[in-house]
Image (tube, helix red, strand yellow):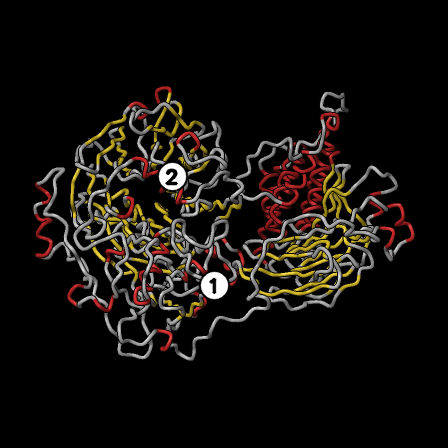
Amino acid sequence: MRFTKPAWVMHKGEIFVQPFGTGLMWVCADTSMKGDQEKRLSIFSVHVHPDGSRIATGGLDAKVRIWSTKPILNHASEVSGRPPKSLCTLMMHTGPVLVVRWAHSGKWLASGSDDQIVMIWDLDPTARGKVWGSDEVNVEGWKPLKRLPGHDSDVTDVGWSPGDRYLATVGLDSQVLVWCGYTLERLHRIDQHQGFVKGVCWDPVGEFLATGSDDRSVRIWRTTDWQMEAEVRKPFDHSPGTFFRRLSWSPDGAHITASNATNNEGYVFIAAVIARSTWTSEISLVGHENTVEVAAYNPHIFLRDPSLSVIASNICSVVALGADDRAVSVWQTKSARPLIVAKEVFDRQIMDLSWSHDGLTLYAVSSDGTMAVFNFDPEELEGIAPKSAQEQYLKKFGFIPPPLPEGYSHDLPVRHMSEEPASSRMTPPPSPGRAASQAQSDFGTTVNGTSGGEHINKLVAKRKTKKRIQPTFTGSLGSTVPSAANGGVDTADSGAAASASGSVGMSTARTSGEAPLSASIANHRHPSSHSASTLASAKPFGLPSRPFGANISDLTNPVEDEDFNMSPIDMNTDVPISSLDTSMPLGKGKRKAADLVDDRVNSKPRTLGGDRVRESVPVREIAGGNAGFSANSSLGLWNEQSSLIGRLQVPPVLTYLKATVEGSEDVFEGRNAEGDGSTEVLFVSGKQTQWLDYLPSPVLAITATTVFCAVAMQDGSVNVYSHTGRRLMPTLTIGSPCSILNGCKSSLMLLTSSGVLHVWNVKKQSATFSPTSVLPLLGSSPNITILSATVRPNGAPIIHLSTGIAQSWDSALSAWVKLGDSWWAKGSDAWQGRQRSNNQSTTRGVISVLESSISERMTGDDVNADKQRPTWWNTALTLGHLETKLHAAKTLESPQEYKQALLLYAKRIADEGFRGKAEELVKELFGPVYWRPGRDEVWSPVLLGISKRDLLKDVLTVFARSKTLTKLALDWQDMLKKATIEE
């Protein structure tokens, strides 16, 4: 699992309250124009677009913000700024936005606010540009399609039913409103709750609707007549008040997991699992230390045994919980324990959770204004089943959904769009204030009734006379949730067919390395071929290249996509929505879009080897691959290398090797052929080969970083490439086969089988230090071996030995230095294994990881906790250990760990009253009293990018709290103030 908290995902501004009528109104002042320090405001909701390309968030600033997911999941994309991080800011609400939810089709976005309004947003390709009253720029435009008034208080949650047939909204007016998901007309009102309604979810079968309320109940409503099916109260009898009560229905339809439940008369906080049909809660998810605020099921069903069929006894689900204890937990229903528990992820309570459609990424937002992202590998969520398995299973319930409004269909129309009369095309839904909404006027007098039926609304496509082609939405809103299984779609319906690809929820956010496609796409293909270019060109990892259940068997010809969006925004920065195709309709007697290509649009770039079909290679060892190559066949630089023979093994020659670029899905592959075939390396991005190279010798090891790719060959040579396939350095001849190869950022490390360590800085094209032997580390004992060897971004190697010692080469000292030693575990109070984890940092430092690794290999005899020790044993070992950590942090350039160890060290010498050590430490950090830049080069004012005198301030604060060093601290604090004033 990969965890990240993108700091740039934020809602910002200054919030204040001012009188409004008889009450108060929240007002947000945008600081983007003032240059003020950005203040992070609460984020109340997050939701992932069905194609995974973007997320929407709602916050205290009364705005809906849309963000691209690729910079979140792909570090290289985040650094490059392509696609842009922020896509759009929507500002029609006048109060904090409490909930955002994409329609299952991906075409519409619903948002609810404490301004009592639900807003439906639609993509508007013409609405790009600068946000009014702000420095922000909308890369894409979303327009308010319709306001949905009806609530008398804050709207706390909304939910789209399966197939977007209905939209349910709930609020603090204790009402549940049901709207048509097609015409957006109000259909029903349910007002039987006796408290604020703070959560809503739909049965995936479509048979029921569930709501959670502050009246301490969860109620289930039938969608056939909107009457109550059941009321569940038992697990909520003692539930406290919370901001939300967001509940979720399992994808197999078997359970509802409801938040804010308790056991033992309110003393144990749980999430209650309610069973379908019986509507009882016999299962509790226990473990959170405060109230559970939100539950969110993974959209996929999981199989207990993937080899067996999809039956009820073989199905389980995965659900995530977010609580007021600032923790996120993920549970699989086949296990009594959670899969993961992420504690202290946020500084305040968790407000919302959302899974990506592929089921591998979980997004969480908090009232502290930050977002956390958990990205799982498919192996970590074992037994994940395709969406087609869920669809097949849900059919067994035998529920027949209600008919759609007249003129709407889940299926794509077979006729040409150009054959539609202009009068039948879609127009925007009428405003609630106009006469066209007369059916709504009687709504307030009906309870659980129908208000005048559902109306058909059309959307008219505007024509542009300019040569530049602007994408405009055409066709029927009946295609909102189309089926990709339709065959026989002709060329005129290519846009609608592309929309179908999005309705199955394929993710494009995980495809990296490809130029993102614009929302306006034209496809070159045979007129009878299906339009599924978004699936062919943007396949998510871990999923097949076509939607489950989609009939695309006749896609035999390669499909090429070209971007016709002539917006000033760079075409490589657009983020596609696979469910939307806004290209111009190709009607009868009209020119094909391909004929209108502007000469400024480049065709798809060629890649070296990109036209070759990639074949999977089974991984196995090639017999006799290392024949004739051993450690003693090296050209060694030292005579004593013979003592290392057999202790540094040469990796076996395998048929396939791969290395993944950190922060992306780009892969560097090595392939050794069996027999007389050729040896090759390939760089693959987005499932397409970007370049390849053929090598004269078999590949032993490969590595890839965000800067370079490197391959070590059997003949003792090394090639270093850029991500485009250029050789960044000449071929390096090492003289011995590689034993270990590792890279990090710009640093490349190679340890030969003859025991010679090399480290290069690829950017500078120079050696970090001269080749160095590891013989002093291994000595003459055959029992000492190297467990692992890695390199830091600054070029410092980390050699972990079987003796429980970690070493690094210090080029300034020309000596090996200890980074960690199991010796400290015998008495140091600061040893990683002895301390309780009270660090709120979300990422562990390199030294912390190193000490944990050493602890895992230690036995009880190594610690000897019961052995009699001298009086000063613990104090001496603790101080020695902390001093070693300080030197190690400097060697490995880990500033956070240096500061942490320094403060622990200061506290320990203060507790012990060691005034001599304290004064020496203070003088070292303060430096010369009359120091000026350029006058005294011996002392540097900065250490690891941190001002030494800033560190001294923290150290003196620690000393001032002690009983023995208070006077020393006060004297030096005065001197530090004077020095700061003089500077």
Residue depicted at 74% across the width and 42% down the height: 787
Number of dots carrying numbers:
2
Label 2 crowd (10 A; few <14 / some 14-19 / many >=20): many
Q: Residue 29: horizontal and vertical position, in percent?
A: 32, 56
- Decide which of 11, 582 is in the foreground and name it: 582
* Kind of residue indicated by mark 1: Arg
Q: Is residue 407 above or below residue 823?
A: below
Q: Quadrant of residue 243?
A: top left
Mark linked to residue 82 = 1
Q: Is residue 853 above or below residue 553?
A: above
Side of 171 where 609 appears, left or right: right
**Furthest residue toward right:** 639
The numbered mark, 2 or 1, whose residue comes first in the sequence reads 1
Mark 2, secondary structure of its residue: strand
> Which residue position holds label 2?
296
Side of 399 where 44 appears, left or right: right
- Decide which of 610, 361 is in the foreground and name it: 610
Does residue 243 appear anywhere in the picture? Answer: no
Residue depicted at 31% across the width and 46% down the height: 99
Does residue 440 appear anywhere in the picture? Answer: yes
Mark 1, secondary structure of its residue: loop
Q: Residue 107: horizontal and vertical position, in percent?
A: 30, 56
Q: Residue 406: horizontal and vertical position, in percent?
A: 16, 52
* Kind of residue indicated by mark 2: Ala
Q: Residue 492: horizontal and vertical position, in percent?
A: 30, 67
